[in-house]
Image (cartoon, helix red, strand yellow):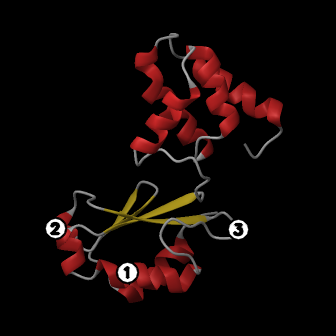
Amino acid sequence: MREKPEEGILKVKSILEKYPKERRFLLAILQDIQKTYNYLPREALNEVRDYLGIPLSSLYSMATFYKALSLKPKGRYVIKVCDGTACHIRGSLDIVEEIKKQLSISPGEVTKDGKFSLETVNCLGSCALAPVMVINDKYYGNLKPAMVKDILESTGD
């Protein structure tokens, strides 16, 4: 957690208080923590373990099973480039290469300033707009490599 430890613990506790102490709410709890921190900090997992009374190994099992959850920090802006069949055929790898060139990161990495992280995904469900990428919740379709720089520059702070 990037803030003072006591502030982080208070955020996690406020998330936990929204849920009954039942294991069936584990995924929802982890999703809320992921949304708050952009990853699942170890300290937060310890709080969840204590709150629900379940082994830490169960938390790690779930955190590594779901692609939407991450044990490593992600950028403030998560770039997901679709590499499903339609996007692949229409040049998604060229989009990935252009992002790598612009940001100096590869899929699975975060920029040094923590602003962007890059992922490739199997499908974003927007085949008609192929190739497609999503930055946080904003979709960009019918992409060409020449469009990437302007999109990245217009994203953010």
Q: Position of residue 149 (x, y in %)?
A: 50, 83
For residue 81, which numbered disc appears in the image?
none
Q: Which residue is mark 1?
A: 95
**Circle nearer the N terminus (3, 2):** 3
The CA span between labels 3 and 2 is: 34 Å
Cβ–Cβ below 8 Å for labels 2 and 1?
A: no
Q: Which residue is mark 2?
A: 128
Q: Residues within 10 Å of mark 2 (few under 14, many from 20)?
A: few
The CA span between labels 2 and 1 is: 17 Å
Quadrant of residue 56 within the rendered picture: top right
Look at discs 2 and 1 and give the one toward the viewer: 1
Q: Is residue 8 above or below residue 152?
A: above
Cβ–Cβ below 8 Å for labels 1 and 3?
A: no
Answer left or right for 86 relative to 49: left
Q: Position of residue 71 (x, y in %)?
A: 57, 47
Q: Position of residue 57 (x, y in %)?
A: 53, 31
Residue, x 37% and y 80% (percent of image)? Answer: 95
Image quadrant where one finds the N terminus: top right
Q: Which residue is mark 3?
A: 113
Cβ–Cβ below 8 Å for labels 3 and 2?
A: no
Q: Nearer the viewer, residue 82 or 155?
A: 82
Residue, x 38% and y 86% (percent of image)? Answer: 145
**Circle nearer the N terminus (1, 3):** 1
